[in-house]
Image (cartoon, rainbow, N blue to C red):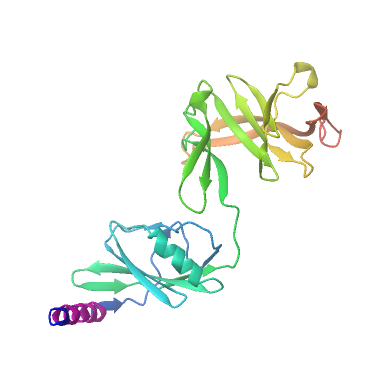
């Protein structure tokens, strides 16, 4: 018991000293990316990690639901411990989490003005599907369709174009978020529209007599029996001096409806004609 008293006293003194060295800056919260300040979140969202526009060392203090926890960060990269985040979310449903960023300067901690994250009493669909491609217009031979679990940061490749001879895969769309019913296009090699119905994949290639060069942007009918597609003739234009080097424009566009059960294209003069 005698050995514990000095340790307890030391911890209390250290905490007291740290608390005295916190300086309230009374300025706006720091600029963060992504900007999560004053947002509302569902209860099953992954930790909202963020970065600061200045790579300093410091601490983050999170307060919510009667609990508080602090954690250290380096180089302006904030990674929130997942277990503590889950507990904080659970205790803060229907209220807010108060977040304070503290910058370490010598023996002082400079506290920026806090911001809030509001926890709603609901959940979201835990998965999102997206295409990953380099953010440029020069190369597109490496791309894929990926799924991420929004409750954590686990990502899974659904289709990578290294499986399809490095062609272009794009414009994926699900019927009412059902992964068993999906539409996706391929360009260049293996061209055509691929439609998954109840887990079975069919390829649909347009013939020249249809009058439609290709399907582009899709939208499923709620019944899952029809898909409305736009048809587009898009081109790229490049500027010499403007910092926004590229413009994309559409020479012509129409809308058609594809009946996936009867394999028919449905058109209307209101949506598919030279004057529409």
Q: Tell me which corner region of the image, top left, top right, bottom left or bottom right, holds residue 263.
A: top right
Q: Quadrant of the C terminus?
A: top right
Q: Quadrant of the N terminus?
A: bottom left
In the image, residue 10 lies in the stretch drawn in magenta: yes
**214 relative to 146, above or below:** above
Residue 31, horizontal then vertical, whole percent = 40, 62
Magenta stretch secondary structure, dominant: helix
**39 relative to 63, above or below:** above
* Residue extending farthest right: 269
In the image, residue 165 lies in the stretch drawn in magenta: no
Is 162 displayed left or right of 230 in the figure? left
Is 200 displayed left or right of 268 in the figure? left
Residue drawn at point x = 51 percent, y = 24 percent:
163
Q: Nearer the viewer, residue 116 or 81?
A: 81
Residue 3, horizontal then vertical, whole percent = 13, 79
* Residue extending farthest front: 1
**16 relative to 158, above or below:** below
Q: Tell me which corner region of the image, top left, top right, bottom left or bottom right, holds residue 174.
A: top right
Residue 219, horizontal then vertical, whole percent = 72, 40
Is 3 displayed left or right of 135 in the figure? left
Residue drawn at point x = 46 percent, y = 37 percent:
241
Residue 248, horizontal then vertical, whole percent = 59, 35
Residues drawn in magenta:
6-20
Q: Is residue 151 visible?
A: yes
**226 relative to 139, above or below:** below
Q: Nearer the viewer, residue 18 or 110?
A: 18
Is 100 displayed left or right of 39 in the figure? left
* Residue extending farthest top: 208
Residue drawn at point x = 23 percent, y = 77 percent:
18
Q: Is residue 101 visible?
A: no
Residue drawn at point x = 77 percent, y = 42 percent:
221
């Amino acid at each position: 018991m005698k050995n514990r008293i000095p340790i307890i006293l030391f911890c209390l003194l250290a905490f007291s000293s740290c608390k005295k060295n916190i300086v309230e800056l009374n300025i706006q919260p720091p600029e963060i990316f992504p900007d999560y300040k004053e947002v509302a979140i569902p209860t099953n969202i992954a930790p909202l990690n963020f970065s600061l526009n200045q790579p300093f060392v410091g601490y983050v203090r999170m307060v919510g639901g009667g609990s508080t926890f602090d954690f250290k960060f380096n180089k302006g990269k904030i990674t929130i411990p997942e277990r503590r985040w889950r507990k904080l979310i659970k205790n803060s449903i229907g209220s807010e989490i108060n977040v304070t960023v503290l910058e370490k300067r010598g023996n002082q901690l400079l506290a920026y003005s806090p911001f809030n994250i509001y926890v709603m009493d609901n959940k979201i669909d835990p998965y999102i599907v997206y295409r990953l491609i380099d953010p440029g217009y020069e190369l597109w031979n490496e791309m894929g369709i990926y799924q991420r679990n929004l409750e954590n940061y686990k990502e899974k490749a659904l289709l990578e174009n290294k499986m399809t001879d490095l062609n272009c895969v794009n414009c994926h769309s699900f019927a009412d978020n059902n992964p068993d019913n999906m539409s996706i296009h391929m360009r260049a090699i293996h061209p055509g529209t691929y439609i998954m119905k109840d887990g079975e994949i069919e390829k649909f290639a347009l013939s020249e007599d249809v009058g439609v060069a290709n399907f582009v942007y899709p939208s499923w009918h709620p019944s899952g029996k029809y898909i409305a597609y736009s048809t587009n003739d898009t081109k790229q234009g490049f500027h010499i001096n403007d910092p926004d080097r590229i413009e994309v424009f559409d020479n012509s566009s129409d809308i058609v409806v594809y009946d996936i059960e009867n394999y028919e294209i449905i058109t209307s003069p209101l949506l598919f004609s030279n004057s529409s």
